[in-house]
Image: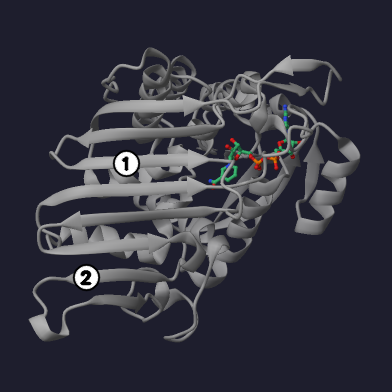
């Protein structure tokens, strides 16, 4: 009999769904030391929480996260609520001795994130942050190729995350579904929301970012607030571009915006090394583009590798070679890796401390956008 791992999910929105799906599917496709149990889902609206609990198979629902944190039958607090809730929930959960999983970014600012890291480390509780893109098989494959030295010395890293859903000046800010536009809740705009992903992946693949120079812009200066009905100044960054230097000497460009008409979630990266280059695109997430200079010169060219074979990362757990998986599976992989790490007693990356490194880069980018100076991110 496997030990049961009782999950207390905070939030039933976009991420509440991806995480609930991940805990449901992971034990079917991976041999795990635990049996995750969807024990309770928490959100402030009882009717909606009850409906979500029924739809996803939670045993009960709650409307106050403090009650979930204090429940003796809960092993894991999974924070899938907006950024302004992460700090208080994570610290209370760690103090109660719970395992803590948290959505990104950790806090709204480095002070919140540092306090969260200190809390889980003081309590000695297992923890991880849902930077799920690391566990896209093609991205994990990129990591493997880099670690094997196949790219050689890396010169360039360029990456974008482009969306187009905030272009209308009539879109309100704040409240359900629109909290990302309200910096009091989100902490920042596209830098913490979108670029945090690019930064996490980049530092995982290519090491620490040592300095940044950023350009940020708020295109729409005031918006009606959904909760107050008042016109209020917009204080998030609508677009954020930065140049960076990595500790290994390579150079980078990062860009994110929600004003790129025609783009919904164009997350791409390209890495140019001395021996080879790699490209990846979220819209075609099961492919890794690879150019190897060692190939015979007449046949040299970009290969589009379909990352679906049994010897590709994670793929032996799924269907048969040639059949692709998608976005939801990145979360299934993270849930599975987390439970395997828990069984083995080993931390599962990214831990809170590793995610703090990303928050420090986000902070340096926002500072540079204001100061118009190069900034050096703190190291975690
Ligand atoms: N890893 C990723 O790719 C990814 C993608 C989207 C969002 N996120 C992160 O996930 C978190 C949630 O984002 P989302 O898109 O799911 O948001 P969402 O707006 O879809 O859902 C948020 C949920 O939190 C609930 N909530 C709000 N305040 C609460 C409180 N005090 N107590 C309990 N529940 C509360 C809301 O009712 C809602 O169910 C954010 O931190 C966001 O940055 C990560």
- Identified at 31% across, 56% down, the residue is 270
Judge the density around disc 1: few (<14), some (14-19), many (≥20) Cα neighbours within 10 Å: some
Tell me which corner region of the image, top left, top right, bottom left or bottom right, holds residue 243: top left
Give the residue at x 42% y 41%.
Answer: 255
- Give me the disc on residue 173: none
Is the residue at mark 1 in contact range of ligand 1, meaning its CB lies under 8 Å from it?
no
SS at badge 2: strand
Which image quarter holds the C terminus?
top left
**Residue on which the image places disc 1:** 253
Give the residue at mark 2: 291
Q: Left or right? Give the position of 120 relative to 71.
A: left
Towards the viewer: 317 or 71: 317
Q: Could you tell me residue 143's position as x and y percent?
A: 27, 58
Give the side of residue 266 with respect to residue 68, left or right. left
| Distance from mark 2 CB to nearest ligand 1 atom below 8 Å | no
Residue appearing at x 49%, y 83% in the figure: 323
Q: Residue 214 appears in which quarter of the rendering? A: top left
Q: Residue furthest right?
A: 47
Residue 354 location, quadrant: top left
């Amino acid at each position: 009999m496997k030990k049961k791992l009782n999950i207390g999910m905070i939030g039933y929105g976009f991420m509440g769904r991806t995480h609930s799906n991940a805990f449901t599917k992971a034990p079917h496709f991976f041999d795990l030391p635990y049996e995750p149990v969807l024990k309770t889902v928490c959100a402030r609206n009882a009717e909606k929480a009850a409906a979500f609990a029924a739809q996803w198979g939670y045993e009960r629902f709650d409307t106050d996260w403090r009650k979930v944190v204090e429940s003796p039958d809960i092993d894991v607090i999974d924070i899938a609520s907006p950024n302004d809730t992460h700090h208080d929930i994570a610290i209370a959960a760690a103090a109660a001795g719970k395992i803590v999983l948290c959505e990104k970014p950790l806090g709204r600012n480095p002070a919140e994130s540092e306090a969260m890291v200190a809390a889980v480390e003081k309590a000695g509780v297992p923890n991880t942050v849902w930077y799920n893109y690391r566990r896209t098989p093609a991205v994990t494959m990129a990591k493997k190729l880099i670690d094997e030295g196949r790219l050689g010395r890396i010169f360039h890293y360029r990456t974008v995350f482009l969306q187009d859903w905030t272009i209308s000046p009539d879109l309100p800010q704040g409240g359900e579904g629109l909290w990302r536009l309200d910096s009091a809740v989100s902490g920042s705009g596209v830098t913490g929301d979108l670029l945090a992903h690019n930064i996490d992946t980049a530092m995982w693949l290519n090491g620490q970012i040592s300095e940044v120079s950023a350009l940020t812009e708020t295109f729409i200066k005031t918006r009606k607030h959904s909760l107050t009905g008042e016109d209020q100044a917009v204080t998030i960054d609508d677009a954020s571009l930065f140049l960076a230097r990595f500790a290994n000497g390579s150079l980078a460009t990062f860009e994110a915006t929600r004003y790129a008409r025609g783009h919904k979630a164009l997350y791409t990266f390209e890495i140019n090394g001395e021996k080879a280059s790699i490209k990846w695109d979220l819209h075609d997430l099961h492919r890794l583009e690879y150019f190897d200079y060692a190939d015979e010169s007449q046949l040299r060219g970009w290969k589009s590798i379909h990352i679906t074979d049994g010897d590709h990362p994670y793929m032996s757990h799924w269907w048969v070679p040639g059949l692709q998986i998608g976005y939801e599976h990145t979360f299934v992989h993270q849930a599975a890796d987390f439970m395997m790490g828990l069984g083995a007693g080993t931390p599962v990356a990214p831990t809170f401390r590793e995610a703090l490194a990303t928050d420090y880069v986000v902070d340096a980018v926002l500072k540079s956008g204001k100061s118009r100076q190069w900034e050096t991110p703190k190291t975690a």
